[in-house]
Image (cartoon, rainbow, N blue to C red):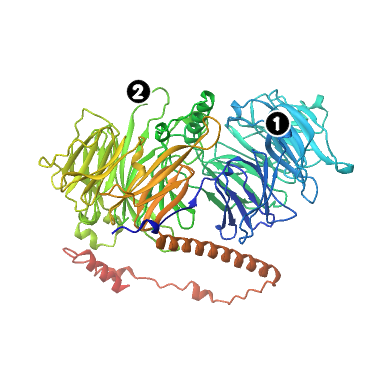
């Protein structure tokens, strides 16, 4: 029986995409604030857990800079490219609206100077006036492809919303400010450096004199930093890996001499980030090597923090919290073809230990959505094109992704490259990342960047979650123009879930690895688990692109090995039990499988044909030919009860396998190539969840459309939906989770939603609230304990004297006593020999 429509609720309360910049550390060193695309999260550095999530009714992708208020420590200023300045209260949980102040630059000034690019400093203690850098934005992420633009140093008054011009520099490609905000450096396309020191004058005016300097090293510069002080230093990171130090404040004619510039050499590729410490004694740099380098400028000694998870793209140091460094890592190897995912690290400045690791959800989309959406938007604007009613639901690109919910841990598993990200939906935080295929851990530079990592293409869990099956591909690197550079290696792996205690992290142990499981150069297109009625669900079905189907089951170890305590002898090997070859003539990715609940029938969809297979002998069921249901390519199919649900390119239909008739469910849709991820079934209640993405008009201008989605829940035999909901962005994947008693949805903003009944949603929200309250209380207790420890006197440690004879007293074994035991061993079981030795000992 299906629940009433009013009992269904949908909420997107977890996940999110971490932004590239804008993360800050509070001056007291207790909290870190991380910016996501749709919300802000506050973390405790003592417990390493999220203690608050601040949801704002706006997209934060346009935030270009942030600053914590010194006057009101609970305020965080957000500076956006839309020329808005927002003050967010990150501490007050009782506030209905976290945005306490909102300022907007006047349109006349922004039309003249451009948009906000960076915050420099507050002018006075009241924080009513700001010094900002305005200008036209760079359209390309890579500095090598950037065009130079003018940059304007201005003063903005929050009381009048007026902009006062201070200074301008033309032909700028890079800029940076010092950690205290008093110095600003500009690098031009002509290899010149302009810098200024911002000084307050009488009458509240700002004085900033632009100084010019040149540097002889003409390699393209991609990062810049300037130190504090009246005579600052400038560090220039180049594409070749050399860092050039310029000692400013000297005569510009003498600037090219060796005494006024130094070269720091260790990096072998792009130096993407540089920053000075507050006192100017250290320079911190990082790049594609995934190594953070600390340069002591006086002694030229170096210190390294290697093997980070990604290339270093941003380093942040606040002069008010010098004990911590904020590091942003770019986890995507090739940002031109893949989504850009970030990781934020908080490091202790004394011992370089990690105090916090912040990650968002990292789904692997079928296409680069950021590039596709931007290109599609520009094309419509240039053509002044309007979409008709039929084109609104036609998606020209595939925005699907893949994830699964583990039945035991209730965690979300997302494959990305050779790794698997495990995300806790309740805590809304990453649990851990595990490597599913061999890969190089160190950063890759120059020609090494062409070496591609293995990629997990498909995976599935058994019904009880005790086993996982993964399929990964490995492309031959394009080196030296070898004949085998187009060869692809395929691997099918079976993993055993090793559950540990609550204090330890559970892990997966590889039991079996099969190379080319469906013959050479034949990839697998689909993996599904067996139903619970077939060997307790401990089996997998795989289908290849030629229509071949294979069944895999574990081989039980021999009884003699099972009795032994040696775990190495208890390895479970997965073997091929049944197979059915494909036609061999047609190779297509439009393949899908489904297994009936009673384990008697397997449905195979290939292109626009559906075949029913007997699960006992893997032969086609001739007396049950399925009529031509699909008039176009099959995207997905599922057996729900006695109904065969088929999703094609143009429609969603249901066919009853008992009555051999079409059901009422017949809906016309426009589904993309990856529409398999947009369909999920609840076999316990015979429900179907389908997500339809479409374009929606969001403005008055032609071509101003955004992606939205509509979520339907059907019964397999009814056309009337049980539930309908709208979402403000497109859905990339939906899965049913028995552990959460509902459907789990993932949108293109990496937000996780749960569609279930009111009761289960209420319990989930209560659990999430308990987790946040527990983390906040733990953080408060640790902070109080640290304060008490500082105030209280250190107690003297008393140690008891222990006699050395008691410590080193050992009982020596006589080897002669083992001689009678080792006699007459013929036919003696190993267990009996072990018992004899233990009795003697």
Q: Do labels 2 and 1 touch, CB within 8 Å? A: no
The numbered dot on residue 483 is 2
State the residue lying farthest toward the right: 202
Viewer-nearest residue: 405 or 623: 623
Q: Position of residue 415 (x, y in %)?
A: 40, 44
- Inspect this view and state whether residue 693 appears: yes
Residue 502: image quadrant is bottom left
Mark 2 burial class by Cα count in 10 Å: few <14, some 14-19, many 20+:
few
The quarter holding residue 499 reads bottom left
Q: Position of residue 669 (x, y in %)?
A: 34, 38
Taking depth in this image into account, of 544 and 709 the one nearest to the observer is 709
Residue bearing the label numbered 1: 111
Q: Quadrant of the C terminus?
A: bottom left
Residue 299 seen anywhere in this rendered image of the structure: no
* Residue occupying image coordinates x 68% and y 37%: 116
* Element on which disc 1 rests: helix
**Left or right: where does residue 490 sit relative to residue 210?**
left
Q: Name the one closer to the observer, 259 or 325.
A: 325
Measuring from the top left, give residue 245's x and y in whole percent: 71, 33
Q: Is residue 217 above or below residue 76?
A: above
Q: Nearer the viewer, residue 824 or 644?
A: 644
* Residue count near mark 1 (Cα–Cα under 10 Å), binned few <14, some 14–19, many ≥20: few
**Percent from the top left, x then y, of residue 756?**
39, 56
């Amino acid at each position: 029986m299906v629940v009433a429509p009013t009992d269904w609720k949908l909420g997107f309360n977890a996940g999110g995409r971490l932004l590239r910049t804008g993360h800050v550390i509070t001056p007291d060193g207790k909290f870190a604030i991380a910016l996501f695309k749709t919300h802000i999260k506050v973390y405790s550095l003592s417990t390493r857990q999220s203690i608050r999530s601040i949801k704002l009714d706006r997209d934060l992708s346009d935030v270009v800079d942030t600053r914590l208020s010194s006057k009101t420590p609970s305020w965080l200023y957000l500076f956006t490219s839309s020329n808005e300045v927002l003050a967010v209260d990150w501490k007050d949980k009782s506030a209905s609206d976290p945005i306490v102040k909102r300022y907007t630059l006047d349109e006349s000034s922004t039309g003249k100077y451009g948009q906000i690019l960076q915050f420099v400093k507050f002018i006075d203690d009241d924080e009513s006036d700001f010094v900002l850098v305005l200008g036209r934005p760079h359209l390309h992420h890579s500095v090598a492809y950037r065009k130079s633009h003018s940059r304007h140093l201005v003063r903005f008054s929050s009381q009048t919303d007026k902009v006062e011009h201070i200074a301008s520099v033309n032909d700028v490609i890079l800029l940076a400010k010092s950690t205290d905000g008093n110095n600003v450096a500009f690098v031009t396309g002509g290899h010149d450096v302009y810098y200024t020191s911002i000084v307050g004058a009488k009458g509240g005016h700002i004085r900033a004199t632009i100084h010019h300097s040149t540097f002889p090293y003409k390699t393209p510069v991609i990062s810049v930093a300037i130190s504090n002080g009246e005579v600052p230093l400038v560090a220039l990171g180049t594409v070749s890996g050399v860092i050039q130090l310029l000692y400013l404040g000297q005569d510009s004619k003498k600037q090219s001499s060796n005494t006024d510039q130094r070269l720091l050499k260790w990096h072998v590729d792009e130096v993407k980030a540089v920053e000075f410490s507050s006192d100017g004694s250290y320079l911190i740099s990082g790049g594609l090597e995934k190594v953070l380098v600390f340069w002591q400028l006086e002694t030229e000694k170096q210190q390294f923090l290697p093997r980070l998870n990604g290339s270093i793209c941003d380093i942040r140091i606040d002069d008010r919290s010098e004990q911590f460094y904020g590091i942003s890592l770019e986890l995507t190897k090739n940002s031109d073809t893949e989504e850009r995912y970030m990781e934020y690290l908080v490091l202790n400045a004394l011992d370089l230990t990690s105090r916090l690791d912040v990650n968002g959800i990292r789904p692997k989309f079928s296409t680069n959505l950021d590039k596709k959406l931007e290109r599609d938007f520009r094309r419509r604007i240039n053509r002044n094109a309007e979409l008709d009613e039929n084109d609104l639901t036609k998606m020209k690109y595939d925005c699907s992704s893949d994830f699964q919910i583990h039945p035991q841990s209730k965690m979300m598993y997302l494959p990305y490259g050779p790794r698997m990200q495990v995300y806790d939906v309740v805590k809304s935080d990453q649990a851990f990342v595990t490597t599913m295929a061999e890969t190089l851990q160190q950063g890759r530079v120059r020609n090494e960047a062409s070496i591609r990592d293995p990629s997990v293409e498909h995976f599935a869990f058994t019904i009880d979650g005790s086993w996982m099956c993964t399929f990964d591909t490995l492309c031959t690197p394009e080196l030296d123009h070898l004949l085998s550079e187009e060869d692809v290696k395929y691997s099918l792996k079976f993993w055993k879930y090793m559950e540990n205690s609550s204090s330890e992290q559970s892990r997966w142990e590889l039991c079996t690895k099969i190379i080319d499981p469906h013959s050479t150069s034949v990839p697998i297109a689909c993996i599904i688990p067996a139903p619970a009625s077939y060997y307790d669900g401990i089996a997998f079905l795989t289908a290849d692109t030629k229509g071949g189907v294979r069944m895999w089951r574990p081989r039980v170890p021999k009884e003699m090995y099972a009795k032994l305590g040696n775990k190495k002898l208890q390895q479970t090997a997965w073997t091929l039990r049944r197979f059915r070859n494909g036609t061999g003539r047609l190779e297509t990715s439009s393949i899908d499988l489904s297994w009936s609940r009673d384990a008697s029938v397997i449905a195979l969809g290939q292109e626009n044909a559906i075949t029913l297979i007997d699960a006992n002998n893997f032969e086609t069921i001739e007396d049950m030919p399925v009529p031509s249901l699909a008039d176009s390519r099959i995207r997905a199919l599922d057996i729900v009860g006695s109904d065969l649900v088929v999703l094609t390119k143009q429609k969603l239909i249901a066919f009853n396998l008992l009555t051999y008739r079409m059901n009422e469910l017949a809906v016309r849709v426009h589904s993309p190539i990856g529409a398999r991820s947009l369909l999920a079934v609840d076999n316990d209640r015979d429900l179907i969840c389908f997500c339809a993405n479409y374009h929606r008009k969001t403005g008055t201008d032609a071509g101003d459309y955004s992606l939205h989605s509509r979520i339907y829940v059907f019964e397999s035999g009814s056309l009337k939906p049980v539930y309908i909901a709208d979402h403000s962005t497109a859905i990339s994947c939906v899965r049913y989770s028995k552990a959460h008693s509902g459907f789990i949805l993932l949108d293109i903003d990496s937000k996780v939603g749960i569609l279930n009944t009111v009761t289960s949603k209420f319990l989930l929200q209560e659990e999430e609230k308990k987790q946040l309250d527990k983390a906040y209380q733990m953080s408060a207790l640790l902070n109080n304990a640290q304060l008490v420890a500082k105030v209280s006197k250190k107690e003297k440690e008393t140690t008891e004297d222990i006699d050395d004879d008691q410590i080193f007293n050992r009982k020596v074994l006589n080897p002669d006593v083992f001689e009678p035991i080792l006699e007459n061993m013929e036919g003696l079981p190993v267990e009996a020999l072990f018992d004899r030795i233990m009795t003697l000992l």
